[in-house]
Every structure is written in C-alpha cells, then in structure tokens.
Image (cartoon, coloured by chain):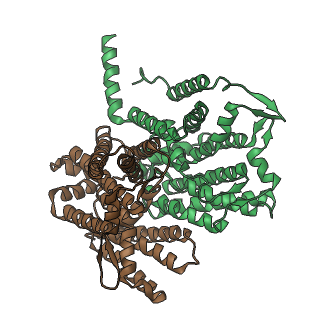
Chain colours: A green, B brown
Amino acid sequence: MTALLPRRGLAQILALIVILAVDRVVSPQFFDLRLQDGRLFGSLIDVLNRGTPVALLSLGMVLVIATRGIDLSVGAVMAISGAIAASLADSHGLPVVLAAALGAGLVCGLWNGFLVSVLGMQPIVATLILMVAGRGIAQLITEGRIVTFSSPDLVWLGNGSILGVPVPVAIALGMLILTGAVVRGSALGLLIEATGGNARASELAGVGTRAMILAVYVWCGVCAALAGVIAAADIMGADANNAGLWLELDAILAVVIGGTSLFGGRFSLVLAVLGALIIQTMNTGILLSGYPPEFNLLVKAVVVLAVLLLQSPKLSGFSGVVARLRRAKA
Amino acid sequence: MKGLPPVLITAIVLVLGFALCAVQFPNIASTRVVGNLLTDNAFLGIVATGMTFVIISGGIDLSVGSVIGFTTVFVALAIERWGVPPLVAFVAILVLSAGFGAAMGAVIHVFDLPPFIVTLAGMFLARGASFLLSTESVPITAPIYSTVSDFALRLPGGGRLTAIAIIMLAIVIGGALLLTLTRFGANVYALGGNRVAANLMGVAVGRMTVRIYMLSSLLAGIAGIVFSFYTSAGYSLSAVGVELDTIAAVVIGGTLLTGGQGSVIGTFLGVLIQGLIQTYINFDGTLSSWWTKIATGVLLFAFIALQQALVALARRPVAKSAGAAS
C-alpha cells in the first residue's frame, strides 16, 4: 500500500497540477497575472476567488464528515445568511450585518447538531429537514424577491482586496488557518477523529462525543453562513432560490476528493480545501475551453467515480495484493 | 412497532389535514380536486414507490430526479427528432434506465461504497447526459400524447381520473404487493434489517442490491415518461430536486431511513400529504409557494422525531430485562 501511495496528499497535488496543465493548454493566458488598481487579476486569481464559497463549506463539512456525519443543509444555510445580510446591509453597519448572518448560521448549526447528537437522528435525515425548509425560510426573509444592496462595506467583502489579494480569498485562508490552529493545535482534531472512528468506544474512553458532534455542526453552520455572506456580497444581492444551490454536493465532493473517508475517523483540512480548488479549476477550465458549462456535471461524475474507486476498501485490498506481489518479486 | 403505527399516524394526519382544508375551503372536498391531486403527483407517486424499496433495504437513491429529466429529454428527442415510434422509445428508455440502476447497484455492492455517494455520481451523470442531449425544452406533438392526455375515467361529482393517475395507482398497488407478498419483498426487509445476518441466512445480497436499484431507476424511468405525458415536453431541467420530495414522502409515510421498516402505502399517503399542502396553498392564493417547503420541513421533522421516539420506546423493555438479568 505504501509503495503505491507514498504520502497523503500527493495524489491530490498531482491531480491539481495535471488539471492546471490542461487549463494552460486550453487557454495560453491561464497563468498570466497582472496588478490593477491594487488588486491582482488573472485566471488563477479567478479560480481562487470563485472557489472560496465551496472551500469555506468544505472546511466545515470535512469536520462533520470526520465524525461520520454529513451536512446537506449548507446550501440552504448560505441562502439564509445571504438573505439576512442583504436585507440588513443598507440599514445597519457591517458588524451588525455580520453578527446577524453568522448568528443565523450558528443557530442552524445548533439545530442540526441538536438533532444528530441529542435526538440521535441519522445525519442525512436530520440535515435534510433544514435543506428542504431552509430555502423556504430564506425566501420568507427576502419575501420572495431578489434583495439588492449597495452598502460599500459589504460589497468590499465580496469584491475588495487586501494587499492585492481578493478579500474572499483572504477570508478563506484566514478561516483555514484558524480552523487548523484550533483543531490541530489542540487534541480537538484527535477527539473528532475518535468520535468518527468509533463513537461508542470514544464515549467509554471519556471523549465527550455529543459535545464534539454538536460543535462540528455548529462550525459547519458558521462556515456556510460566511460563504453565504461572501456569495451575496459578490453579486451585491441575495437570491433565495439560487444562492448556494447544489453547493452542498460540491462541498461533499471536495471533501471526498481530499481523501477524507465518508466512513469518518480521519480528515485533512488542507486537502479538503485543495479538493475545492480542484473542482473550481475544472469548472474554470471547462468555461475557458469554450465547451458548454453543462459538461461540468459529466466531468464531475467521472471524477467522483474515479475517486470513489480509489477509496474503495475492496480496491485498496486489491492494490495491497499487487504491492505484496511486487515486494515478493523484488 | 411492526410497521403499522407510523402508517396509521400518516393516514390520520392526511385525513385531519384534508378535513381542516375542507372546513376552510369546502370546494377541496370534491372528486375534481382529488382527481387533480392524483394527476399532479402521479410521477412523484411512481418514483416514491421505487425509493421506498431502496430506503427499506437501507440504501438511498439520489439519482431519480436526474433520471426523470433524462427520460423526458430522451423520449422527446426520440419521438420528435429521430422519428422513433413512441412505444419503441418507451421500451428503449426503460431498458436504459433499468441498466443504469443495475450499474449503480453493482458499483455499490462490488466496491462496497456508500449508496449516498454512488447515486450522487449517478445524479451528476444522468443530468449531465440530459444536458448533452438538449438544453432546450422539446415539445412533443405525437398523437399518442394527446390520446393519453384526453383519456380519463369520469368520477361522480365531475372529477377526472386521468390515465397517468391510473398508471400511478397501478404501480403503487403493484409495489405494495411486491413488497409484502413476495420473496423479493421479504429479502428487501431482511437487507435493511441487518445486511450481515441476511447474507448469513442465504439472501444473495449482491443480486438483491442490483435488483433494488434497478427497480428504483426503472420506476424513475416510468415516472419520466409520465412526466412527459403531464407536460407534453422534454426538458433537461425538469424534475430538479425531486429526489428530496421523494425522500420526504417516503419518510413522512413512516419508512425508517435506517432501513428494515416501511410500506408502499405509507409512501403513497406521504405523497398525498405533500400534494395536499400544495393544493391548500393554491386555494389560499395569498400564501407563497415557499410555504410548501417550510411545511414539508416541519412535517419531516415531526415524523422523524416520532420515529425516533418509537424506536426509543421499543428499546426500553430490552434495556430493562438486560438490567434484570445482570
């Protein structure tokens, strides 16, 4: 096994490099960067910028999946927080807007976490409730309209730049570092992995599994709310019908591409974000190549299947046999 | 705890809901409205019947909405552009969708992968394929379509039981019989109850998995044909998100999402409850359609919480007797 997959993450990095190379072939200016009005522009920056919502979602999702859970409601939470941010933006200051939007995400996460950890519901079912109802709630907030706003503070969140780097990218990077520091800088990450590996054994060993599960869903809700605010700021409006639509699937896909097993027990934050970037690089590549964007779905389906087969317990058993045969020969 | 109580509760909710609606809008209590309810939800009832089998067996099928979309586009193009006789096109698409489901079932079993993610890939694949066929709505003008749309049994009170509603009712009854009376149905329950135990008792787990997903996709294909009758068109974006409505109907119908328990009749009642909410909102006129989603979410929560409570109740005596033994 070790002979075939030397280090975790190598496969993902290689995949990203291959896709980048393909993009370079499709569009010769792909790697061009230029500085304009104190902000970097170019296809690469575009990939980072557009990949931000899914990257943020995958940061929360990867922790949830590590506990053997799943959160289907993140797209709906994005719609709710975006709707709140857009309706408050022109009447309140940025701190109030952010607090309200992120607070909504926190409440959504608490609700999901409560259903899963306290009531003991299956995660797919528990989060399905908010996935169905959440978009309705968002439409209730926007009263079925597309709410637009012009608050420069909020627009800056989606379109501004810090030291040439677009603000969304900086926020995603900050969240990655923050999550990484909290989860990997302490034993928290280990406890989350223990919860996903075997909840009962961890409980007996003294891990507060219920608190862990509640915490990861809350974090997932907050990350989704942040993604929703950024998505709303990007288009200067909130569309309750389409904001974050199907992004939960992209986020799960990013986590799976990042090598985190859906059976829980281990996770990698950096690789999940890398997975989000891989998805976005493919999307951008297809757009640049001039193929209709409909090809996205087919390409994604093929990628999911390929990654799944690589992760399959049966196949890794097979490659283990191959590795053993090779060793025997050598 | 043997399946009946959740179905009864679903039935009571439906009857109570219908009574409440009828009190507020007396016109709802007519065969005309009921006939429309069945017609409007015909495709949902068909696809939910298949989903019931999948969920009772402990799996999930996210690809059904995309399969419906693909079917409508395929049928429309085959009849209108490629000049294929409608019946041949129907057979072709049913074979295709059954094969698609069988392939997903095979991947789930052979590679031991979670059904959730395999059928997610299937959902992308089928939707992407329907985009490739056509991104525009293709109207169907074949004579069989107007014949089928015009056909209806007159009900007393002016209601019409349309052909697609009859197809749906036939499939629901057939599905209920298949699930309760045949060895196949018993095996579906066994798989959902405990896969390992089922295997040890001699259930061919692999073959069953393939057949269950094949059945679900086949019914999704039929639902797609019914959907094309309903709209007289094929559109690659049709039935987006139907998988969620379907799963919600199955859960509201009292089927346990962990598998092992449930019934087709319950699912049918769940479909009717969703249709009733939609009808109520149409009658009211001032409520917006997004209330459907919120109401469905609330119902989902209520039913899942109820199931959870029932499961907890069922476990309690076991825990007590274990305590007494020790």
Above or below, B29 relative to A118: below
Choose top left, top right, bottom left or bottom right for residue A330. Answer: top left
Residue B58 appears in the rendering: no
| x, y percent for residue A172 | 67, 42
Of the 4 image quadrants, the one containing the N terminus of chain B is bottom left
Q: Nearer the viewer, residue B79 or A264?
A: B79
* Residue name at image x 39 percent, y 63 percent: B230
| x, y percent for residue A218 | 59, 56
Q: Is residue A10 left or right of residue B167?
A: right
* Residue name at image x 37 percent, y 52 percent: B61
Choose top left, top right, bottom left or bottom right for residue A24. Answer: top right
Q: Is residue B190 left or right of residue A76?
A: left
Q: Is residue B127 left or right of residue A137?
A: left
Choose top left, top right, bottom left or bottom right for residue B30. Answer: bottom left
Above or below, B281 relative to B259: below
Residue that lies at the very extreme toward the right in this rendered image: A37
Q: Nearer the viewer, residue A183 or A259?
A: A259
Of the 4 image quadrants, the one containing the C terminus of chain B is bottom left
| x, y percent for residue B211 | 24, 49
Q: Nearer the viewer, residue A284 or A100?
A: A284
Tag count in the figure? 0
Residue A42 appears in the rendering: yes
Q: Nearer the viewer, residue B307 or B296?
A: B296
| x, y percent for residue A124 | 44, 55
* Residue name at image x 50 percent, y 27 percent: A11
